[in-house]
Image: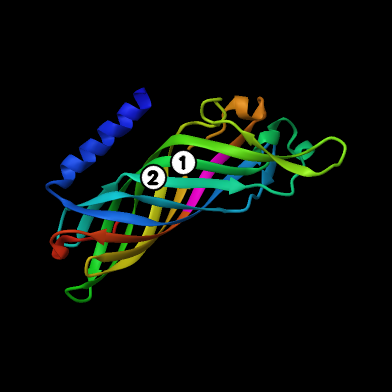
Amino acid sequence: MKTKLIYAIAFTFLVQIANAQMIGVKGGVNVANMSMSMAGMSYSPDALVGFHLGPVIDFKLQKNLYLNTGLLYSLKGYNLRNVENTQLGNASYLNGRAKLSYFDIPLNLAYKIPFSNKFKFFVQGGPYAALGLGGSVKNPQKVSGGGLNTSVPIQDIYSHGTLAKADYGVGAGAGFEVGPMVFSVNYDYGLRNLNFKPYTLDIPGTLKITTLEFSITYMFGNLASNVGTK
């Protein structure tokens, strides 16, 4: 209940600020993954395709310099396949298809270069914070007798203390806007080690999320003040 209240307050705060600023709606595709190393060994999961969606707002700082932020629901994760549980030892729960849902709050400085009244190119970068909402891992395990694989769902990974719930990192990207439409690509790199000891049963290691985002944003209001958002 406390976490839900924090999310509600954050959303209300952003909406109130947006009453006096430029506001838009952003959505797109995530290509997410997890950088993994356990007990001196590195693992290379396959990327998981997810999505992001939510409101964004812009603040004009100077002629070509803007600050943008928002509140985005974002689906991330990874898919670690063809790795036997015995190779992962006590960290066997890492082996599987993980889906992690977050509220992302980016804070980017954006510099835009106008080529005409309706076409602008921009580059941007800055930190972000993320709050975990929930997640699960479908862990392939061999059933006794037949040696076949089956997907066994693991319950909420945050409630079991298996991953750190809060994340933060840095991102950078570029894009262009045509009238009210903004097209952008952004790469986020998590800086926090999300590894909790209960997740890996005291095996030292690092878990960091990376996300490549492809986005489309529709901006409302005075187009002359718009800027590409994260």
Q: Is residue 32 magenta?
A: no
Badge 2: residue crowd in 10 Å (few <14, some 14–19, many ≥20): many
**Residue at 22% of width from left, 65% of height from top?**
180
Give 162 or 133, whichever is nearer the viewer: 133
Give 220 or 153, whichever is nearer the viewer: 153
- Which numbered dot is residue 60? none
Q: Is residue 19 above or below residue 88?
A: below
Give 170 or 159, whichever is nearer the viewer: 159
Give 29 or 153, whichever is nearer the viewer: 153
Q: Residue 189 placed where, x, y %?
A: 47, 48
**Residue at 32% of width from left, 62% of height from top?**
123
Q: Residue furthest right?
A: 145
Residue 230 appears in the figure: no
- Tell me whether circle 2 and circle 1 mark residues in contact (CB < 8 Å): yes
- Closer to the chain start, of discs 2 and 1, is 2
Q: Residue 181 placed where, x, y %?
A: 27, 66
Apparent side of residue 161 relative to residue 12 in the rendered image (left or right): right
Magenta part mainly helix, strand or loop? strand
- Which numbered dot is residue 73? 2
Q: Secondary structure at mark 2?
A: strand
**Residue at 58% of width from left, 31% of height from top?**
155
Badge 1: residue crowd in 10 Å (few <14, some 14–19, many ≥20): many
Label 2 and label 1: CA atoms lie apart by 7 Å
Residue under numbered circle 1: 101
Q: Residue 52 placed where, x, y %?
A: 40, 51
Apparent side of residue 119 relative to residue 94 in the rendered image (left or right): left
How many circles with numbers are drawn on the protein?
Answer: 2
Highlighted magenta segment, given as a residue range: 207-211
Q: Is residue 86 above or below residue 58?
A: above
Q: Amino acid at mark 1?
A: Ser
